[in-house]
Amino acid sequence: MSLSQAQAFALTQLIEVPLIMLMAHYYHVKWQRSLGFAVLASTLTHPLAWWFTWFMNVIVFSPHRWIWFAITEGTVWLVESVILSKGLRLSWAKGLYISAVANAHSAGFGLCL
């Protein structure tokens, strides 16, 4: 199944935002703050990840798509972890953890489609 960018973005938000909010709640972050920064993190990174992956697979015809996928997801993970750790006022390690869990779920689900 191939998703449009809008569909993939909506799916990403549906998966990542509740997970981030749940994990942030564990660290005593107010839900309003976690909601805002969860949406912000994906909104900033998803378009870049989508277009970079599309470019490498469609335009460049890279035979190393899994390497590019890993590089893209790793970059998204790091950028979102900075946004979440700073925005939610959590340690760097907690931001990395929350971002890793959320991105692993959304990327994994997307790969299953």
Image (cartoon, helix red, strand yellow):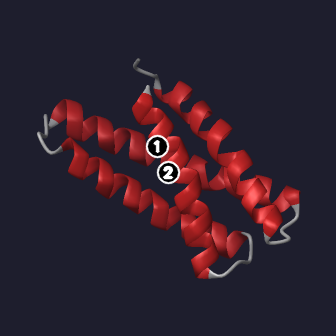
Distance between the alpha carbons at the discs numbered 1 and 2: 5 Å
Whether residue 71 sits left or right of residue 46 in the image: it is left
Relative horizontal placement of residue 47, taking residue 58 as reference (left or right): right
Q: Residue at x 58, y 79 (%)?
A: 93
What mark, if any, has residue 93 been given in the picture? none
Residue nearer the viewer, 44 or 113:
113
Against 37, residue 55 (above or below) is above
Label 2 crowd (10 A; few <14 / some 14-19 / many >=20)? some
Could you tell me which quadrant the C terminus lies in?
Answer: top left
**Front in this rendered view, residue 40 or 26:** 26
Residue at image coords 73%, 61%: 23
Check disc 1: other Cα within 10 Å, few if <14, some if 14-19, many if 20+.
some
Residue position for label 2: 104
Q: Quadrant of the N terminus?
A: top left
Q: Whole-percent x and y of residue 52?
A: 32, 44
Among the 4 quarters of the image, the one containing residue 81 = bottom right
> What is the x, y in percent for residue 44?
55, 52
Q: As shown in the figure, which amino acid type bears the numbered disc 2? A: Ala
**Most foreground residue, 36 or 19:** 19
Rendering quarter of residue 9? top right
For mark 2, give the secondary structure: helix
Circles 1 and 2, Cβ within 8 Å, touching? The answer is yes
